[in-house]
Image (cartoon, rainbow, N blue to C red):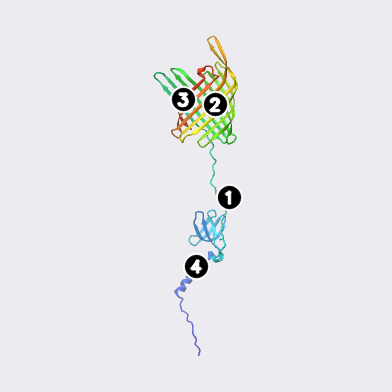
Amino acid sequence: MSLRREAKFPSEPSRSCLNFLFCLPALLLLVSPFAHTKAAELHFNNGDRISGEVVKRTDGKIYFLSPVLGNLIISETEAVIIEIPDTPADSLAGLPPVIEQVRLRDADVPRPEQRPAPPPKWRGKLEFGFNNHSGRIEAKSLNLRGEANYIKKANNYRVNSRYLYGETNGLVTSDRRDAAFRWRRELSGKVFAQTATSYFSDRVARVDVNLEQNAGFGYKFLTQDRSTASMGGGLTLQYRDAAGVENGTTVLGEFFQDYSYKINGRLTFSQDLNALYSPDPRTRTVITGASALSEEADNYKIRFNSTLQGKLSERISLNLRYEYEYDNAILLRENRSDQRVSSSLGYSF
């Protein structure tokens, strides 16, 4: 006797089966884009990371599909693709990970716009000083000064001028005008060439015109953060037209030295010295009444200047100066030397 068992099928599909059939198209739509893509991670320049699939790369852009963020388009300059291999991690033990990085040519890297450096400007200072004394004596003095510097690469240009005037009890004791232009050119770190042109006239010393042209070389023997010093020498061609002195042109040897020390952020001390000498003397002729006395005078001159500058603000400064000059080729003995201590208010530009 054989037994036969018949399978029974439900007359209606179950609810779980219907749910599965309903969700199947949605799952196929979600999975289908990944069928031809490759798993990877995007590492952004700011440190962020996104997992997903690389759809394609073209025209410098990455088309990326993230399960969370959806379709993304990112520039290759903003992120690096780290591909995740399909091989199980167990089989890759001991092997380095496969990393694909996008390297850009230097020409493709955006660079900030470089603006040309502004051209150097003239920098200088104007000074004004005035003293007035009344009482037992009547005295007043005035000093005006101007100085400007211009530095361009190895060239250093300086222009300065000065006007001095003084009276004591109605008698003019000082009336001098002078100006100078100096050009220094660095030949090496410490050696430089120099040329200087200067002019002065002094009514008290009875010098109508004094012109000098110097050329020489110098050496910077001190170059530190807060102090600099140099010295040098050369030849000076001098032309002078003065009362009672042999006029004309002569050649003098010149020695010069300058020093600058920045005491602190507001105080600066500077000093310079010039000494000139000619073996060719000048004839001085002193006229007394109806007679005239002539003598041969050594032709030499010394100039010494020192300045202590204190900054009151970025542009305003107070300047204290000591100046000494001696010129042996001037006629009268009392006019050959001139020394002064003066103060002035300066304005920088």
* Local crowd size for mark 3, using a 10 Å CA cut-off: few (<14), some (14–19), many (≥20): few
Q: Helix, strand or loop at disc 1?
A: helix
Kindly report the distance in space between the C-alpha atoms of the residues bearing marks 1 and 4. Answer: 45 Å
- The amino acid at mark 4 is Leu
In this rendered view, identify the residue nearer to me: 107 or 183: 183
Marks 3/1: CA distance?
63 Å
Label pair 3/2, CB-CB below 8 angstroms: no
1 and 4 marks in contact (CB < 8 Å): no
Query: Horizontal placement of 153 versus 318: left or right?
Result: right
Q: Which residue is mark 3?
A: 341
Mark 2 residue type: Asn
Q: Nearer the viewer, residue 138 or 285?
A: 285
Looking at the rendered structure, the kind of residue marked 1 is: Asp
- Relative to 265, is 330 above or below? above
Q: In this figure, which residue is indicated by the disc labeled 4? A: 27
Residue 204 can be seen, yes or no: no
Which is more N-terminal, label 4 or label 2? 4
Give how far across and how far down residue 303 sits, in percent: 53, 25
Q: CA distance from mark 2 to mark 4?
A: 98 Å
Give the SS element for disc 2: strand
Report helix, strand or loop for mark 4: helix
Q: Earlier in the sequence, mark 1 or mark 2?
A: 1
Circle 2 sits on which residue? 274
Mark 4 and mark 3: Cα distance apart in space: 100 Å
In which image quadrant can residue 94 be found?
Answer: bottom right
Q: Which residue is mark 1?
A: 106
**Alpha-carbon neighbours of circle 2 within 10 Å: few (<14), some, or many (≥20)?**
some
Above or below, comparing residue 171 to residue 61 in the picture = above
Give the mark toward the camera: 3 or 1: 3
- Which of 37/159 is in front? 159
**Mark before the other along the chain sequence, 1 or 4:** 4
